[in-house]
Structure formats: C-alpha cells, structure tokens
Image: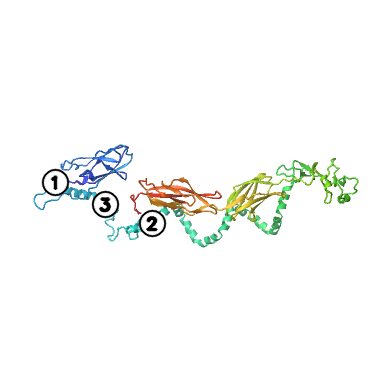
Amino acid sequence: MTIASNKNTPRVAYTASANQLTFTIPFEFFAVTDIKVYNGTTLLTYDANADAVTEYSLTGTASDSDESYEFGAGGTVTIGATGILNGSIITIIRDIVIERASDFPSSGSFDMKSLNTDLDKVYAKLADLDQHIDRSVKLLDTDSIAANMALPAKATRASKVMAFASDGTIDVSNSTASVATIAAIASDVTAVSNIASDVAAVQDIAANVTSVAGIASNVTSVAGIASNVTTVAGIASNVTSVAGIASNVTTVAGNITGLNSFADRYRVTSGDPDSSLNAGDLNFNTSSNTFKYYSGSAWASVAATDSNIKVSSNDSSAGGLLAKLTATGSTGVTLTETNDGSNETLNITLAGIPIAKLAASAITINGSAVSLGGSVTVGETKPTISGISPSIALASTATTIVITGSNFVVTPNVEIINTSGAISYPLTVVRNSATQLTITVNLSTKASYFLRIENPDGLAVRSSSALLVVSNAPTFSTNSGSLGEADKASAMSFDVDGSSDSTVAFSKTAGAFPSGLSLNTSTGVISGTENGSQTSTTVYNFTLRLTDNESQTVDRAFSISVSVGMENSGQFN
C-alpha cells in the first residue's frame, strides 16, 4: 500500500468523556502488535476479548487502495469495560518492531507483495522515529556543531540535577539534595529577593552588625522592656532633671520601703478614704479638720492629748508605779483612760515576775482580753501565696506571671529567690487585687526559684516550695523540609535531631509517614521498610513535636519522598 503523508502521523491523543469506550486510529498500521494504547501514563493490555478497563481490543479497516493490508485505513480501539474517568487522556501510537520479514532470491522473479510490504514498513518506521525525534530534546539546526550533548557516566550523574554549563554542554554538578533544600525554603528565598536593597544596605554596615552581635544579650534585655524605653524617651526632660538630683534619688531609693509604707498609711483628703484600707491607716480629714485612724472596720477620731490620762496600779497595797515595775509579787501595771467615759486597762507582766503571777495576768486591748497563760497571740494579716501561672519561664526571656493568694497590699515588694540563695527582682509588679499580682521577670540563670512577697507594713510570706522553674525551650537541630528520598519497597531510615536542657521526647502531631515506617520517640529516627504500594512518586508531609521534661514544646514540619523511578524528569537517581 502507499503511505500517504497526511495519514502517516503515528500518534493521536483524545480527552475522554466519562466511560467512553471507542477511539479512532487515523493512521495506517500492519498488525495489532504495532499499536500501543495509554490511559494517562498507564500502558493498557491488548486482548482480542477485552473485558476490563485496563484492556483493549482492536478492529482494523482495510485500505481501498491496497486490499493486501487489513489495516491500511486505520481502525478502532475499544476499551474492555466502562470506568474511564471524564477528562482522561487516551494516547494511541504506532511502534513497529524493526525486523525484516522476507528475503528475496538472488535471481528470478520478485514477490512484489512482500517487497511492497517491507518498503511500507520501512517508511512507516521512519515516521515512527520521526515523531519520537520531534518530541525529544535535541539541538537546533542552527546550534554549534561543537556542542557535546552526551550524558556523563551513570556514577557521575547519579543523584544529580541536569543543567547546562556556560558553553551549552550538559552539567550535572548540582545534587538533588541541594535542590530539595532550596525548594523547602522557597518562600524564604522569595522574601530575601523582595528585600534585596535592604540586604545590600545591611552589607554596607556589616561592621556595625558585628558590634551589635557582640552585645546580643543586652539587645535582648532592652527588647524585653521596649515599651519602658519608649516611655522613658517621652519623658527625656524629666530624666535629665532627675539626673541632676541623683544623690537625692539614691537616698530615697535606700528608704523606698519606708516611703511606700508611709504613702500607703498616711493620707490627707477632704473625706474619709473608702479603698485600699488596712488597720492602722491614718488620714487628716480637711473638711472636718479631724485626724483619724482606721480600726479595721471604720474610721475613728484620734483624741487630743488629755492630762486626765494617767498611769495607776490595780494593786492598792503595792505603792507607786516604780514599785509595781520592780516588785516580784506584782500582778501588773494598769493604764486607765477616764476622759471619754470608758475604762480601758492594760495589764503588763514584766520579766522577773513569778510564773504564777504571769499566768494570771492579761492584756486587754480595745475591750478584748488576750490570755498570757504561757503565750501571747498578736493579730497579724500576712499575705499568702496559693499558686502561680505559668510555673515555667524561658531563660533570658521576658515572661509575664500571675501570682494568686491573699492580703496583697499596694504595692508589695516581690523577691525571686534562687535555690542557691541569690535574690532577683521582677521588671514590673502590678497589684490587680488583694488576691492577685502580675509580675514580669527576665531571668538568665536556669534554676528553681522561691517567691517572697512583703507588704508595705513589713508582713511577708515566702513560698514553702520552689514554685518557678527557669528553663530553655527545646529546639530542633534538623532543618524543616525534606528529610530525603528513597525507592519504594526499600528499607528506609531518616534521623531528626533536637535537644533541650533536659530529656526530650519526639512525637508526630500531624500528617503521615510512608506505610511501614515508624518513629522512635527517644532518638527521633524514622525507619522501617516501605510497603511498595505506590504507582508514582509520593511526598509524605508530617509535623513532629519535641517535648522536654518541663512540658515545653516546639513543632517543625518535614517530608519524605518515596520514588518509583524516572517520571518524565531531567533528574537522575
């Protein structure tokens, strides 16, 4: 048969509709073995009685121009069963086996049918090769004839990315691992590209950057109090004024506890204060011109000095006050107030008085008797600590901590005490209420710490146990992104490393490993034998978490690729 050029393009591709079964072969062929059919990249199987979606049968159409060839006018491919997805790409190609099917005698007549068949197959095969060449990587006709396009040896190109050198020849000097690393930080590369001018500017001040790096801890400390720095900048003139009286400020600082206590205890107002009240507080009421004290439940006037107040004895047989103070048989000394119609007594037993007398003595304060039967109970309202949150702070990092308890007075002094005895102080202390304080700490020493809270009146509490732990958070030393690639159905092992100032444990919080692989929670090694079920290269993405003994965590994303061989790529493995 003749091989017409318009019917000799030995490749055709169709976009299938759902469950489409038949597809036309528009080119000439010689036998069913000349035809190959693909669904996507999957080669289907020829079967004259095809009954599956992975099989096909073939019907040829005879050519009117040459009755010797059954398939001279193409034919039809029929898929063996429904199941083709809508949008599937069905590709049909001719791929004639290179062979000579007949031999001609050295003399006598020619078998013209056999000769025509061989010539037709030769031209058909040339067409097959031509379509393969047209779809291959090749040099332009105008390219340099000196260009060398030969691939390097297998050992040289293994695990390399194919590129082109400056002279246009093949270059395999870059590894696939390097490409994977860059791909994993593609967003970072883009971000740096977008600030190229800034990077150049930083390069121009590299010496300054090095200087700042040398005082990085100081920079971190200032960053932790950035809002305070901004506040100070806004009152620069006031700071200059204070600098001029620095010695006075130092004197005041040495007496700050007393000043705070005095400011909290004594006030001058137009009425009687109704907040931040503690027994013993003093106030001068400018409206009534009276000086008052707070009894713990109400404001009471302080009486003026009265000459009627005197010291007398409740033992008429013992003589004067001096005798009462020195007599061994005394029952005490009585202070009697007579100017307001009440009689308040204070019985005092001094050292040297017999025990029998001491046991029978009493102190009467504001009408309430306190027994002296071997002990004295003095009423005090001390602060208490019931807990803190959080109980773990990062070393050299500003951390806000809430302290809960009771009887917190404005503004208490807070001490943070290392188990070694060293004392540190918070950056800030805020009294939220009588039962809650908020402090900001920035501690560089990793240790356990007690808390001590002292009210302005000197009453204090120290936690019975070390409530606060300062520790470093765990960190990964393995970069995020791809851990590597391995062939399917092979034994695999990938190592992820991380550490902290205590023992760490690894866990997977999201994603999946290739089937057959598992994580060693102590070492971070992911290993096992992949089950080999993949039909194409698959990337498995997952997130690992690192947890230390203080329950601090950090997460990082990783991936593992399972390959099934070359897939239309310029990469060699």
Q: How far apart in space, not on screen, are marks 3 and 2 (Cα)?
A: 29 Å
Quadrant that contains the C terminus: bottom left
- Which element carries disc 2, helix, strand or loop? strand
Q: Nearer the viewer, residue 406 or 168?
A: 406
* Disc 2 target residue: 175
Query: Which coloring applies here?
Result: rainbow
Q: How far apart in space, not on screen, are marks 3 and 1 (Cα)?
A: 30 Å
Where residue 243 sits in the image (x, y, percent)?
A: 67, 58
Where residue 536 sits in the image (x, y, percent)?
A: 36, 47
Amino acid type, callout 3: Ile
* Disc 1 target residue: 113
Neighbours of disc 3 within 10 Å: few (<14), some (14-19), many (20+)? few
Which one is in front in this view, the residue at disc 3 or the one at disc 2? 2
The image quadrant of residue 72 is: top left
For residue 156, above or below residue 74: below
Can residue 185 be seen from the camera position used here?
no
Given contact means CB atoms under 8 Å apart, are the residues at marks 3 and 2 in contact?
A: no
- Which element carries disc 1, helix, strand or loop? helix
* Disc 3 target residue: 133
Q: Nearer the viewer, residue 321 or 241?
A: 321
